[in-house]
């Protein structure tokens, strides 16, 4: 048996809880009407002897008291035992019918002054609960009236006897139709509010644009049943557009303001032949516009966070990754190498005689030289290589999945490109140390090997590439020692 989709199961559970909450609220709300009517009928019976001698005052009062107590019990029981709510509602309807029938019987029968209570009991069930329960109450009221008429010796099937039930049903059906329409409208609004609430919470918790788009698409599909919903990036109109495209009705809702658009929510559905209207009301567009605004806010927040993240990982002078970015990437690539067995290489690049260059030409010229070397490194490496500013005048290049001999080739290409630069007509060179790790080589060992190889390149005369070994353990490697004079 397939496992239910978790979001669908959550939706069903939420719908069940919402229905139960509505029924509980309505059950408590109708209680006030019942008690008020029973108190009014009881007080009217006490004041009735002068104008209604056929009313059995004591019987009417006792019936009202016992019915009120029964309704209070039917209201209290589900508060103590929530699982008894449905049974309590049905018990209340039975008490209504019994109360109305007993009062009418004690006050002159179906032709007496209180016969209208049968209609009243059916009406408050219709308006207070639902159209379905109101119709059930109407059947009970009609049956009670006919039984009372038959008990008094009348013909329940005569035209005169059927007139009051016919009037009752005319009133009841009208009330049921209006109640059902209002209930349906309120239910749709409640469902849409729930969808929008859950979508807003999901957008707040989402950390990527893809997740936000998926949340919005599913929410839009729920508020527009029968429509196919798509979220499309790109330019967007300034307002909502409703049009016909071929045989489809199309609604386009912009996501974001005109100055910062993120795309559109597009809804489509086929139109019947020769029908040009969409059948869309303002209540349909409101939730879509709310979803679009929520998505725009979420995407703007995601862009801002991504920008901050990029800035926190980028060196402002060179535009390369900074030391934090280098550490993160190297740890990830060496862990990947340990898991897959593929090699990972690294180049450590030092600008030759950079201190002397700064002293001779000034720090602004040194910054220009460093930026030019960074551009050369970025331009002469591959798309898969990761360039960073390691610190000071040192740059680093991580070469994922690259064997040692190929890493030497990349480093030599970088060295040649830099040597061909003319920064303000001044020649700049670099010394590069290359190391390659495989298997269980750690990031620390790889950096140590590349560092030693770079020092060796500088000691050998600079402007050259030297390959290092990663076969030393961290304990064997020891400190790198002071750098040769720049």
Image: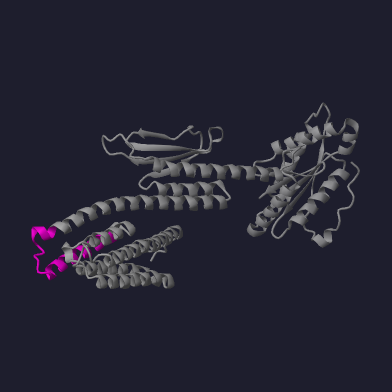
Image coords of residue 258 (percent x, y): 53, 33
Tell which of 106 and 209 is nearer to you: 106
Membership of 16 in magenta stretch: no
Majority secondary structure of magenta residues: helix
> In the image, 366: left or right of 119?
right
Tell me: 429 left or right of 100. Answer: right
Quadrant in the rendering for residue 412: top right
Residue 222, position in %: x, y? 41, 50
Which residue is pictured at 25% across the width and 66% down the height? Answer: 100
Is 9 above or below relative to 230? below
| Image quadrant where one finds the C terminus | top right
Q: Is residue 225 visible?
A: yes
Where 64 sits versus 294, above or below? below
Residue 197 x/y as whole percent: 49, 52
Please give the name of the residue rendered at 84% of the width and 29% of the height, measured from the top-left corner: 426
Q: Which residues are magenta?
A: 133-162
In the picture, the quarter occupied by the N terminus is bottom left
130 with respect to 437 (left or right):
left
């Amino acid at each position: 048996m397939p496992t239910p989709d978790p979001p669908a199961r959550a939706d069903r559970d939420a719908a069940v809880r919402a229905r139960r909450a509505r029924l509980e609220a309505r059950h408590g709300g109708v209680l006030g009407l019942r008690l008020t009517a029973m108190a009014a009928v009881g007080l009217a019976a006490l004041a009735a002897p002068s104008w209604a001698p056929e009313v059995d005052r004591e019987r009417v009062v006792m019936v009202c008291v016992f019915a009120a107590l029964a309704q209070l019990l039917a209201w209290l029981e589900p508060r103590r035992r929530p699982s008894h709510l449905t049974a309590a509602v049905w018990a209340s309807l039975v008490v209504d019918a019994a109360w109305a029938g007993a009062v009418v019987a004690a006050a002159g029968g179906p032709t007496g002054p209180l016969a209208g209570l049968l209609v009243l009991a059916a009406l408050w069930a219709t308006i207070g609960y639902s159209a379905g329960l109101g119709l059930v109450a109407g059947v009970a009221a009609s049956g009670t009236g006919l039984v009372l008429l038959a008990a008094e010796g009348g013909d329940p099937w005569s035209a005169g006897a059927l007139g009051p039930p016919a009037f009752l049903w005319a009133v009841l059906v009208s009330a049921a139709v209006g109640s059902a329409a209002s209930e349906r409208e309120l239910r749709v609004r409640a469902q849409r509010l729930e969808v929008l609430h859950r979508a807003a919470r999901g957008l707040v918790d989402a950390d990527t644009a893809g997740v936000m788009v998926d949340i919005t698409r599913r929410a839009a599909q729920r508020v527009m049943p029968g429509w196919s919903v798509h979220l499309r990036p790109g330019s967007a109109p300034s307002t909502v557009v409703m049009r016909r495209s071929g045989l489809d009705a199309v609604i386009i809702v912009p996501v974001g303001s005109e100055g910062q658009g993120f795309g559109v929510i597009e809804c489509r559905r086929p139109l019947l032949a020769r029908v040009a209207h969409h059948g869309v009301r303002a209540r349909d567009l409101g939730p879509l516009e709310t979803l679009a605004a929520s998505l725009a806010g979420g995407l703007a927040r995601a862009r801002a966070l991504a920008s901050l993240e990029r800035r926190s990982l980028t060196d402002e002078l060179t535009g390369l990754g900074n030391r934090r970015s280098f550490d993160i990437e190297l740890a990830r690539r060496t862990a990947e190498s340990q898991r897959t067995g593929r090699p990972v290489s690294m180049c450590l690049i030092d600008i030759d005689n950079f201190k002397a260059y700064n002293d001779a030409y000034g720090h602004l010229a040194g910054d220009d030289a460093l930026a030019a070397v960074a551009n050369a490194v970025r331009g002469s490496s591959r798309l898969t290589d990761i360039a960073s500013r390691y610190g000071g005048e040192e740059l680093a290049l991580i070469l994922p999945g690259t064997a040692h001999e190929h890493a030497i080739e990349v480093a030599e290409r970088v060295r040649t490109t830099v040597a061909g630069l003319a920064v303000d007509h001044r020649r700049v060179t670099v010394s590069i140390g290359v190391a390659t790790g495989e298997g269980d080589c750690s990031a620390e060992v790889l950096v140590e090997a590349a560092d030693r190889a770079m020092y060796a390149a500088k000691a050998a005369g600079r402007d050259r590439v030297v390959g290092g070994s990663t076969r030393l353990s961290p304990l064997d490697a020891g400190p790198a020692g002071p750098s040769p004079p720049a």
